[in-house]
Image (spheres, helix red, strand yellow):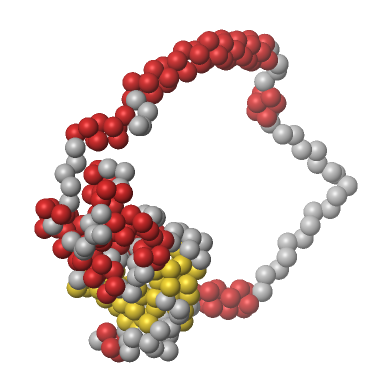
Amino acid sequence: MFFLTELGARLKEARLARGYSLDDLQDITKIQKRYLIGIEEGNYSIMPGSFYVRAFIKQYAEAVGLDADQVLTEYRKDVPEVQKEEVAQSFSQSPSRRKMAASSNNKMMEAMPKLIVALFAIVIIVVITTLYMQKAGSVPDVEEEFDKPIEYEQNQNSTPSKPVENNDDSTEQDSDESKQPEEPVAEEPEAVQAISEGVVQGEDTTFEVSGTESLKVRVEVSGDTWVGIRNEQRKEQVTDRVYKAGEIVEHDSTANGYARIRLGNSKVAKVYINDVELTYAQDRMTQNIILKLVNEEQGE
């Protein structure tokens, strides 16, 4: 029977504080549930090795919003040291660089004859094209025909046309009207949506949205992540749960003028405000995005 270590208790406390079950955490981190239980209970014997223990603990800490490096440093007595043999074994399981380089060289040597044949073919085509163009030079130059003056035959039977009398009054009136400058039409500038840089405070980042009257939120998910959208009174606007890759979470927060988006894994989620992608202000896996709609009067 195993008891919770200080590290396991700290991680479990952070998981429960976020409302994650072990199944939710398994969906977010892709770590098997039995390994997550082993981390909380300090039962590292079921792990593939101490190298994976540290990697799993770091991923667990990031998923529940903790600083992984700080956790590993603070509870280093609870974390087994990585043995040199395990590191060497982990590298030996991947393809050798030397074999990869040798295979690439072999492929290059096999492709060399084809490249040489292709170059000869290109040279032959260029030579044939050059000879053809030289022979084509014997054709009379068309430009000489254009240099000859154009002769016009005058029709003696045709009668000269009479000049049209111009109405001096109408001409002067048209010229006076054309001289009058046109008054420029003042166009009202179109309002352009603007999103502030974002104020970071712990896990929260507050953005102000101005230049628009709507606040439509869309979250596109490319991997498993927890997503929740709430109003300023922390009332649930969409169902808080783990969303799968390909799902889209949408909510029109215009009436509230406020939206609080909870992301369990921001690495696999893109947030759009009125179809404009939001740039995160901090590189944190778990974070809260707070949006406030600010009109021009409030901004002044």
Residue drawn at 19 percent across, 34 percent down: 84
Q: Nearer the viewer, residue 252 or 138?
A: 252
Is residue 168 visible from the viewing direction of this image?
Answer: yes
The residue furthest front is 1
Q: Nearer the viewer, residue 216 or 19?
A: 19
Q: Quadrant of the C terminus?
A: bottom left
Residue 80, image x and y in percent? 18, 47
The residue furthest right is 157
Residue 50, image x and y in percent? 23, 44
Residue drawn at 33 percent across, 89 percent down: 233
Number of marks in picture: 0
Residue 179, image x and y in percent? 49, 74
On screen, residue 41 versus residue 155, left or right, reads left
Residue drawn at 51 percent across, 16 percent down: 111
Q: Nearer the viewer, residue 131 or 50?
A: 50
Is residue 212 visible from the viewing direction of this image?
Answer: no
- Which picture quadrant has residue 95? top left
Seen in the picture, residue 214 relative to 100 is either above or below; the reply is below
Q: Nearer the viewer, residue 224 or 170?
A: 224
On screen, residue 149 versus residue 276, left or right, reads right
- Which picture quadrant has residue 258? bottom left
